Image (spheres, coloured by chain):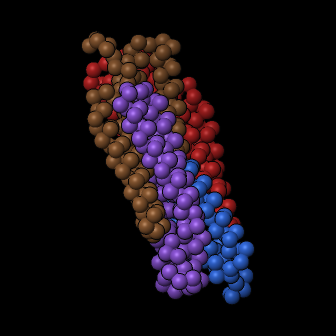
Chain colours: A brown, B purple, C blue, D red
């Protein structure tokens, strides 16, 4: 990619940060398996699942903010059908996020 | 554990099923890291995060149902302060789940 | 209803409290209409919708806690198919709540 | 407002539609009070609260889509600090919505 091109995604400069958070989430999924294997108490497992869900949700909100700041702003400036399509796509992603 | 004791948790007979689902969720967390490493499009990553959140939510709802069916029912039958404490604890877990 | 019968619902002694909260929520719905009529700013309206959603969610969690404490505990003590049916019904209500 | 000014909000041409939906939601809040007054069953009330929450959520998602399509797109085209501030504000509203 040459330096005057837009990156294909909005999270480019935070890639390492997202990878770190996703590795921690992967670790939480392994921790949950250990809890089930060791017959730990349902409520304690549920507490960990809630913590993991919150961590995932926070990744989603970060990605969405990066997407709006870069991809959607760029498309809005370019204008036309591309702009409308990007807004449509972002709204659909927000709806999936709110309903999940 | 002797045969006349209650198991310490409600998901006892579904342990393998939960482990299988949690391993799949761990795989989804690894898949997300791959998507970020390969610079995939934000919206496609968000779609996968939503799918993973739904899978986690479904594990929570399963664990909660098992907990109500076993631990809470047993405590209600035993009665007294233990029964009230279990209901309180279950309600708190439901609130964390609804708010996460 | 004679005094030795269970009430048909779990929120009996908190009826006035729930009515008060629901009247406040009705007032929030009217406030939102006023905001739209007065062309107020989208983000300010969204903030009010979030507050109203939180108030509704809190009513749900209260009703669910009352339901578990009374109806589900009574059914668990009675035992049998009725107990299983009540747990099933409560789990379904929790799932609708978590997914809404 | 003169015809060459931007409207102060993004939902301008859907005002009647939003008012209609909010009036229906106000009616749902009144219906819930009637259910509580008539001592209806907790689970039936919870089902109606879930329906009302979904209706509110759908109003939120509509307002947010209108806001992105108009206010955010306009700000992105204007550029500068105003653009960044609008994105920040929209992301915060999305986070409140996801977490409520």
Split into 4 quadrants, where in the image is the N terminus of chain C? Answer: bottom right
Q: Give above or below for C88 relative to A3.
A: below
Percent x, y of residue B33? 38, 37
Percent x, y of residue B81? 48, 84
What residue is rendered at 41% in x and 41% in y?
B30
| In front of the other: B96 or C20 | B96
Rendered image quadrant of residue D55 = top right
- The answer to whether any part of residue D77 appears in the image is yes
Percent x, y of residue C22? 56, 59
What residue is rendered at 64% in x and 82% in y?
C77
- The answer to whether any part of residue D74 appears in the image is no
Percent x, y of residue A89? 51, 26
Q: Give above or below for A31 relative to A58.
A: below
Give left or right: position of A31 versus C95.
Answer: left
Q: Give above or below for D23 relative to A45.
A: above
| In front of the other: A12 or C97 | A12
How many marks on residues? Answer: 0
What residue is rendered at 46% in x and 17% in y?
A83
| In front of the other: B83 or C22 | B83
What residue is rendered at 50% in x and 57% in y?
B19
Give left or right: position of B48 versus D17.
Answer: left
């Amino acid at each position: 990619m040459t330096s005057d091109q837009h990156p294909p995604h909005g999270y480019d400069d935070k890639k390492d940060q997202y990878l770190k958070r996703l590795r921690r989430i992967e670790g939480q999924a392994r921790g949950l398996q250990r809890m089930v294997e060791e017959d730990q108490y349902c409520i304690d497992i549920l507490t960990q699942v809630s913590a993991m869900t919150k961590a995932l949700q926070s990744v989603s909100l970060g990605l969405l903010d990066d997407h709006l700041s870069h991809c959607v702003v760029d498309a809005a400036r370019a204008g036309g059908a591309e702009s409308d399509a990007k807004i449509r796509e972002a709204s659909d992603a927000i709806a999936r996020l709110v309903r999940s």
